[in-house]
Image (cartoon, helix red, strand yellow):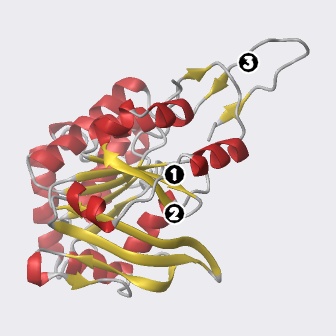
Amino acid sequence: MADEVEIPDGDEATSRARGYHMGDVETVISVEDVNRQAKAMAEVIGLDKIGELANNDPYVSINNLKAGYGKMEILHGLNLQVAKGQSLCLIGPNGAGKSTILHSIFGFTNIFSGEILVGDGDDKMDVTHLTSSQKLKNAGIAYILQDKSVFPGMTVEENLLMGGYLKDTTAESREAAERVFEKYDRLAKRRNHPAGVLSGGERRLLEISRALVMGPEVLLVDEPSIGLEPRFIDMVFEILDDLQNAEGKTIIMVEQNAKKGLEFADIGYVLVSGELAIAGKGNELLENPDVGRLFLGG
């Protein structure tokens, strides 16, 4: 929930807390309270609604997935659908299982039951138990890590080439890197600079671009705005918007800046305790008073 909480002192009527959406809220609320209130507002969400939000033509489907870490189950029979060229934003309190969904799609968790399918129509691929490398190379799924995943001592170009480590030849990686430089002049001008000297926004651009070297169709984006100044947050979401709407990428993201994420995404899911509590269009969730009260500071 909140990154920082200021405990009320004495008779202070109100306190300030930096909320889930990176803004200010008037009252302090604990993670336990958020979970309790979020559970109370949970809806019964059928597969028909999930399918309708994905235009009844999902490119990524998660069916009755139970997954977690070690023997601990975090996701309890989760269903998810998103169409090709759509974006889905996952929000919810800390510990809700948002990042676990991304981890499960990319192969970082133990899958206890259920399935994960990727592809169009009859060409869907069951990727449930593929390795992360197989998912990247064969199913076109790329994971964009949270901030600070660049190699600061390597040049921008060398960082990009690292993104093509599964290419058959170095020449293919270089060709893909050149396409990235053609698209993003900001990186091209710094291709021989150490990545450690880049601004926060440029580092995030490099992290996104490195994932593009393998030519993925599905982008799993973990906290794209984390650690960035507002001007760089806008830049990153403009980049993601271009990848979705100009290049047809399918985007599934976790975003702690819930307002920004829902403004961007076609679909929004609210997760609570490893289960889907609310699903709707992004703009519908922005107007939902319960979502606003708990996650948007309103």
Callout 2: helix, strand or loop? strand
Question: How far is the residue under mark 3 from the one under mark 1?
Answer: 28 Å
Q: Specify the label residue 42 is tagged with.
A: 1
**Amino acid at circle 1:** Ala
Question: How far is the residue under mark 3 from the one under mark 2?
Answer: 31 Å
At x 53%, y 26%, the residue is: 297
Q: Is residue 141 above or below residue 156?
A: below
Task: Write down the residue under mark 3.
Answer: 15
Q: Is residue 101 above or below residue 151?
A: below
Q: Position of residue 250 (x, y in %)?
A: 21, 58
Instruction: Please tell me whether mark 3 or mark 2 is closer to you in this view.
Output: 2
Q: Is residue 206 above or below residue 189?
A: below
Question: How far is the residue under mark 2 from the one under mark 1?
Answer: 9 Å
**Amino acid at circle 2:** Glu
Q: Position of residue 40 (x, y in %)?
A: 60, 48
Q: Position of residue 245 (x, y in %)?
A: 12, 46
Q: Position of residue 142 (x, y in %)?
A: 29, 66
Ranked by sequence position, the earlier of labels 3 and 1 is: 3
Instruction: Please tell me whether mark 2 or mark 1 is closer to you in this view.
Output: 1
**Amino acid at circle 3:** Ser
At x 64%, y 43%, the residue is: 34
Ranked by sequence position, the earlier of labels 2 and 1 is: 1
Drawn side of residue 267 relative to residue 170, left or right: right
At x 88%, y 12%, the residue is: 11
Tag 1: Cα neighbours inside 10 Å, few (<14), some, or many (≥20)? some
Task: Write down the residue under mark 2.
Answer: 275
In contact (CB < 8 Å): disc 2 and disc 1 = yes
